[in-house]
Image: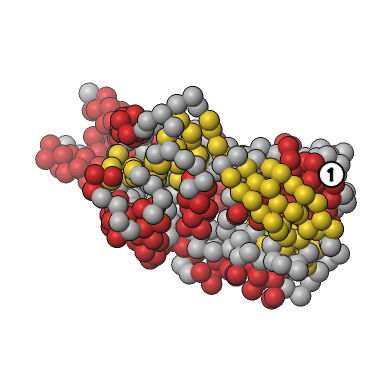
């Protein structure tokens, strides 16, 4: 009977630990972060966010269950006083998170060994790759720039790139081991970072000769701590760049321009008048953009369905790199004319009843300003749906207050998703002149859908600005 109780309680605690395991996975297995937020459960999950049963997660789950079994066997087989058993069970419930963290810490050496094996294998493949390697980093626009560049390069070369937003060492490993082919001519790698040394680690694996520095700004301030830390981390790409190539800097960003001034290697400044590449004579409408592209003192007229100045900056940076790698400006222009907006990055979706602007991938104030500028190009009732900006550290309230104020100057209705930034967005929107009757709050996607159905009318334009993951409150 005691053995049965031990197994039953172990199973009960194991099932009850699902939220804790999901929180740990969402934190990137950051044990220190989980311990700092021990009783608060900083992540909430429902809908699309569930525990992903990766090999690492399965190893953790198995060890955790074995520890639970061991503890419960000790409690029910060695303790005979009923009240002491009750106390032990209650204490176990309180320390489940700690036990899960302990399991992760026990496995850390093994996980590090597995990671190092993957990195070693990927490095060998990357070192033997005879083609050109291009690194792309920055705070905003990395994925857009990568996608633009690859589409242009594919007209002339065989190109491999990191898929989706795989911008970590393990993402690069996956690309090198599973996707990179021996006859590929160019490898394009997106590089992300949350702390100092992340870009340096990726550069040590890739050893590229070419790079693109997109806009740098207030992104992931919660993990970096300061804007200067963000700048120095992004500059690691320049510090570890191999000789013989070139770095393209998007100087539409003041911070990126200052980083360009720090760099002593071969460089090209773009999105600055008189620079290596930039656009002029911009005419933007709800249907797209027309402009003149200047590269290396050559010019060509371009018409594209892409909307948004920041996306055009990314497009120019990609075009400049493609030109450096041997693609003619005429072919660049032809390709740009065929490029369609990427999913979730100012993507225009026309329906018989309404127009949707999907900018759900964006998560910064500058990009939100671009999206609102695009929204203003359309006629009809304007509805904005947003959870605000996250991971902004001490500036979280300030930046979301500013976002609320910007939104109020454009939209007719504002739907705020989740609690995370509700106060800041509301107060900012009211300061901008929006009325209480124009403000709406949804806790779930279902509530959002119901509110939207009530508010929209034929010809409405709906902007989805950022998509706070379901695991945030």
Q: Quadrant of the C terminus?
A: top left
User: Which residue is depicted at the point 59% across and 69% down?
Assistant: 255
User: Which residue is depicted at the point 64% across and 51% down?
Assistant: 283
Is residue 323 at least partly visible in the picture?
yes
Helix, strand, or loop for circle 1?
Answer: helix
Q: Quadrant of residue 66?
A: top left
- Lateral position of residue 431 relative to residue 281, left or right: left
User: Which residue is depicted at the point 55% across and 51% down?
Assistant: 109
Residue 110 lies, in percent from the top left, at 56, 47
Residue 14 lies, in percent from the top left, at 34, 34
Residue 70 lies, in percent from the top left, at 35, 38
Q: Quadrant of residue 406?
A: bottom left
User: Which residue is depicted at the point 63% across and 64% down?
Assistant: 252
Q: Quadrant of the N terminus?
A: top left
* Up/down of 270 relative to 383, above or below: below
- Lateral position of residue 103 relative to residue 162, left or right: left
- Lateral position of residue 245 relative to residue 29, left or right: right
Residue 432 lies, in percent from the top left, at 33, 58
Is residue 74 at least partly visible in the picture?
no
Q: From the viewer's side, name the closer residue of 156 and 119.
A: 156
Q: Which residue is mark 1?
A: 331
Q: Quadrant of residue 429?
A: bottom left
Q: From the viewer's side, name the closer residue of 78 and 463.
A: 463
């Amino acid at each position: 009977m005691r053995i049965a109780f031990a197994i039953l309680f172990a199973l009960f605690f194991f099932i009850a630990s699902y939220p804790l395991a999901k929180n740990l996975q969402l934190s990137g297995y950051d044990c220190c972060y989980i311990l700092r937020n021990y009783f608060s459960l900083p992540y909430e999950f429902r809908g699309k966010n569930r525990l992903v049963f990766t090999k690492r997660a399965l190893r953790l789950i198995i060890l955790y269950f074995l520890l639970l079994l061991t503890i419960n066997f000790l409690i029910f087989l060695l303790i005979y006083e009923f009240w002491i058993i009750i106390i032990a069970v209650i204490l176990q419930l309180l320390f489940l998170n700690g036990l899960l963290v302990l399991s992760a810490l026990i496995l850390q050496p093994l996980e590090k060994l597995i990671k190092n094996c993957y990195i070693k294998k990927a490095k060998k493949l990357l070192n033997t790759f005879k083609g050109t390697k291009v690194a792309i980093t920055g705070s905003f626009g990395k994925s857009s720039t990568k996608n633009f560049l690859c589409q242009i390069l594919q007209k002339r070369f065989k190109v491999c790139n990191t898929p989706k937003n795989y911008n970590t060492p393990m993402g690069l490993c996956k690309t090198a081991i599973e996707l990179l082919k021996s006859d590929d001519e160019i490898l394009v790698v997106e590089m992300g970072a949350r702390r100092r040394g992340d870009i340096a680690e990726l550069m040590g694996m890739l050893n590229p000769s070419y790079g693109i520095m997109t806009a740098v700004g207030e992104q992931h301030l919660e993990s970096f701590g300061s804007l200067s830390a963000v700048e120095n981390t992004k500059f690691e790409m320049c510090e570890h760049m191999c000789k013989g190539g070139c770095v393209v800097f998007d100087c539409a960003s003041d911070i990126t321009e200052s980083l360009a001034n720090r760099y002593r290697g071969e460089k090209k400044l773009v999105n600055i008048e008189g620079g290596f590449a930039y656009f002029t004579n911009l005419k933007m409408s709800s249907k797209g953009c027309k402009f003149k592209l200047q590269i290396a003192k050559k010019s060509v007229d371009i018409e594209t369905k892409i909307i948004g100045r920041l996306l055009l900056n990314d497009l120019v940076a990609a075009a400049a790199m493609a030109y450096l790698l041997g693609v003619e400006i005429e072919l660049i222009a032809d390709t740009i004319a065929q490029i369609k907006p990427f999913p979730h990055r100012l993507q225009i979706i026309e329906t018989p009843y309404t127009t949707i602007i999907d900018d759900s991938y964006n998560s910064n104030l500058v990009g939100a300003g671009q999206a609102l500028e695009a929204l203003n190009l359309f006629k009809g009732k304007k509805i904005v749906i947003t959870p605000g900006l996250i991971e902004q550290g001490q500036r979280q309230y300030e930046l979301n207050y500013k976002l609320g104020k910007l939104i109020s100057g454009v939209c007719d209705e504002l739907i705020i998703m989740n609690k995370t930034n509700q106060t800041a967005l509301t107060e900012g929107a009211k300061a901008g002149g929006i009325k209480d009757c124009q403000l709406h709050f949804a806790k779930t996607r279902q509530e959002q859908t119901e509110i939207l159905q009530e508010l929209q009318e034929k010809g409405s334009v709906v902007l989805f600005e950022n998509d706070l993951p379901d695991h945030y409150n």
